Image: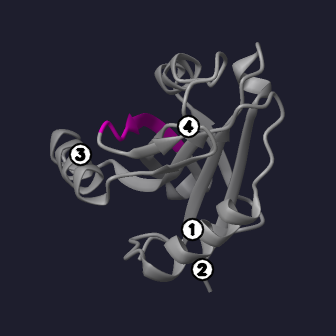
């Protein structure tokens, strides 16, 4: 298992990830959308670099919810891992909210806990990102990281 120090944990987003988030913001009554995050882990720096935000095209979506297609996302993850010579890992999930300063809802927190319990992780952490609809994409992202004991 890849273990990062909870107290020193750092993360960065590649520009392409921010562009994906911006592309899928809920600005005009669109339904929520989401998917998974993949990227590299640098143990020596206790840092994660999110390289790609993959969109679940088969997700069940509504204005106030999204259920990503797990089979689709596993297939996409397998492809990304292979294409990166297994340097990229599953880092977590992301989805949108129709608000400029997103907050995790009760349903979000329930989902996070469910994912932490059920996911087979190769890391001791999982990231959950909510993308808001503010104009400055860097200020409208809520990043929550949960560490497994």
Q: Along the polypeptide, which appears first: circle 3 or circle 1?
A: 3
Counting other residues with Cα less than 10 Å from the Cα at mark 1, is it few (<14), some (14-19), or many (20 or more)? many
**Nearer-the-camera pick, 142 or 125:** 142
Residue that carries the numbered disc 2 in the rendered image:
148
Q: Which residues are magenta?
A: 49-57
Give the Cα separation between the discs numbered 4 and 3. 20 Å
Q: Along the polypeptide, which appears first: circle 1 or circle 4?
A: 4
The residue drawn where x is 23% and y is 41% is 84
Residue 37 at x, y = what percent?
45, 45
Q: In front: mark 3 or mark 1?
A: 3
Q: In front: mark 2 or mark 3?
A: 3
The residue drawn where x is 43% and y is 80% is 118
Q: Residue placed farthest to the bottom in the image?
A: 149
Q: Along the polypeptide, which appears first: circle 4 or circle 3?
A: 4
Asked whether, in this view, residue 69 is left or right of residue 128, the answer is: left
Give the Cα separation between the discs numbered 1 and 4. 24 Å
The reply to whether the C-beta atoms of the residues labelled 2 and 3 are less than 8 Å apart is: no
The residue drawn where x is 76% and y is 15% is 136
Main SS, magenta residues = strand
Residue that carries the numbered disc 1 in the rendered image:
125
């Amino acid at each position: 298992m890849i273990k990062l120090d909870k107290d020193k944990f750092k993360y960065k987003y590649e520009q392409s990830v921010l562009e994906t988030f911006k592309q899928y913001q809920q600005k005009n009554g669109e339904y929520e959308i989401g998917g998974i995050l993949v990227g590299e882990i640098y143990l020596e720096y206790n840092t994660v670099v999110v390289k790609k935000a993959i969109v679940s095209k088969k997700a069940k979506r509504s204005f106030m919810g999204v259920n990503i297609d797990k089979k689709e996302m596993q297939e996409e993850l397998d492809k990304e891992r292979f294409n990166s010579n297994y340097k990229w890992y599953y880092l977590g999930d992301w989805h949108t909210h129709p608000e400029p300063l997103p907050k995790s809802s009760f349903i979000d927190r329930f989902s996070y806990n469910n994912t932490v319990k059920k996911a087979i992780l190769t890391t001791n952490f999982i990231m959950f990102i909510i993308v808001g609809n503010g104009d400055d994409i860097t200020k409208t992202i809520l990043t929550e990281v949960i560490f497994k004991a």
